[in-house]
Image: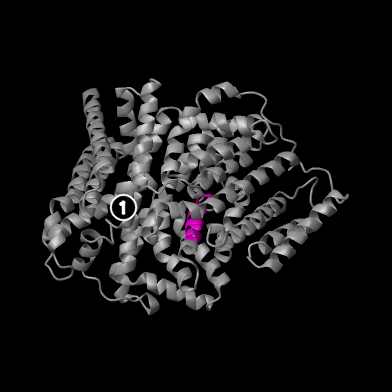
Amino acid sequence: MEKKLSFEKIIVSVICVAMCVFHLYTAVFGVFPTSIQRSVHLGFVMLLVYLIKPIKFGKLRWLDYLFSVAGGLASFYVWLNYDRFCTRIQYVSPIEPLDVVCCFVLIILLLEGTRRTCGMALPIIVLVFIAYCFTGPYLPGVLNHRMVSISVFVENMYMAYEGIFGSALGSSATFLFLFILFGSFLESVGTGSYFIDLANRLVGWSRGGPAKAAVVSSAIFGSISGSAVANVYGTGIMTIPLMKKLDYDPVFAGATEAVASTGGQILPPVMGAAAFVMAEFLGLTYLDIIKAAAIPGVMYYIALLMMVHLRAVKQDLKPMKEGFVSNAHLLRNSYLMLPLIVLIAILVMGYTPFKAVYLSILTIVVIGILGRRLTLKAFLAIFVDGAKSAVTIALACGASGIIVGVLTTTGLGVTFTSIVLSLSNGILPLALLMTAVACIILGMGVPTTAAYVIVSALCAPILIKMGVLPIAAHMFVFYFAVISAITPPVALAAYAGAHIAGCDMMKTGIQATKLGISAFLMPFMFVYSPALLMEGSVAEILRCLVTCLIGSFGLAMAVEGYLSGKLHIIFRVACFAAALLLIDQGLVTDIIGIGILAAVILLDWSGHRKKPSTI
């Protein structure tokens, strides 16, 4: 048995190394033709998933080996038939029986692999869409569509670039994999621990220090991580116990970490890898996307820090008194930040993400070798860890590609747009609310990148048709897909925080929703104030930045109910109303909002205060 396990580990290691070498080769010398790049990438993933996520019943382990080989061959089949697939005429050239077999084998095994890595939510959604594809002709009303034949289904889902091998998987096969590998390299040289030490040193000494450190470290690490849940476990295992040790309520500790970790998905430079998919969908450069996301991402964390600070003052929570590393230690190890600096600098200079991440990885390799942190064994571990980490995102991208394929094949995207436009009666605020709810529901339990792919295909066209800027529309749906991770009843990031904190999951989810409320309002702000996305003059951008900061402060006061003392419920409502007024770009609403907040602050400071709450 031991030999068998050892042999299996060798096979997994070989596949992982081969996968990493393939992607590093394409980073240096350029990608292969689209269908080859994507099919080879998914082929490696299908070979791996059933080896690293085995079936629970040990006696059926042979099924995993069968699924692994079958899934890999079904994907590599596209590469092996590259010439025939490229020269055939869509919907005219005949489809061979083996094409149909490989298509359905790949879909079935792709969904089973997705179930093992991502849970049941995404596979169920995909199956519902596939069922709709074939049952649509028998449905009444607006859901009715023309019959989709098996040949058309196979062409769109398997042989074209609008199904499994669509843009989402294309991003996974190019940018995403390299950034995941970049994260593995960073972790191997100790950058993750350095982030936490740096955050503790920066804010740990202040009131609410441990919670603020959790926010800062999660912001840095979370942008690189491709998953909010992974980020919670990556940093939360250190920050949550520390918060509890210093008398923080476990629910608050778990919720703070969940909200901070989720925010990493909307914070440049990497944004949980979804920025690359968005750039491809919008036809913009990667730099355009991270520039647009910069102000909202920073505002998200400023609002969260304000809430954490007010909670710390309200409950008289103590700062950290020990556990700090010295300034000399931070300075001595500051070279660990160099790969991130190189990454950002090269992106700002206008080079491609491919070149930026490749040179950043090269920087880590040099640092690791000079610092004697990277040995041959360490390289092997990095390649294995990086390839395994990429499996989840690749499967989610492939599965969500099926949904996009169904939308285009059946015309459901256009139908959904018409339904929302009709129900909202052309009223933008109502359409925004309906779209937000749809995005949260569609994003629940689904990895960030896959969630964005789904909502961008289904919901973004609605807002664009109503006159919203394309970049604002895509950012809007992206935000709500992301914050589904902290929105009950399926708040996976909050539940992960609750698991570490050892507290009630639903209470943690509700607390996380309160702490992350700025993320629920921010998308409305940049729809009505595109200057927040760097769309406009410098004066407009600065004005929006100032009003957004003031609004975030008002929102924190409303949620925590505290300033220099406990705020009366009327003052809390006034603060929330002021924050809403500051959403609109109009000068009048801004003045009224600022005036309301100023009045609340003056009344609070002039004696309308109560004793601090001990909630």
- The overriding secondary structure of the stretch rendered in magenta is helix
Q: In the rendered view, would you say 320 is above or below 612?
A: above
Left or right position of 295 against 61: right
Highlighted range, magenta: 475-486
Question: Percent position (x, y) of residue 412?
Answer: 36, 71
Which residue is at the far top?
Answer: 372
On the picture, is 560 further left or further right than 95?
right
Residue 96 higher or lower than 262, as above or below: below
The amino acid at mark 1 is Leu
- Residue 55 is covered by the magenta coloring: no
Name the residue at 53% across, 47% down.
263
422 or 470: nearer the viewer: 470
Q: Position of residue 280 (x, y in %)?
A: 36, 57
Does residue 331 lie above or below 232 as drawn?
A: above
Q: Is residue 121 visible?
A: no
Residue 574 drawn at (x, y percent): 75, 60
Q: Is residue 432 above or below residue 389?
A: below
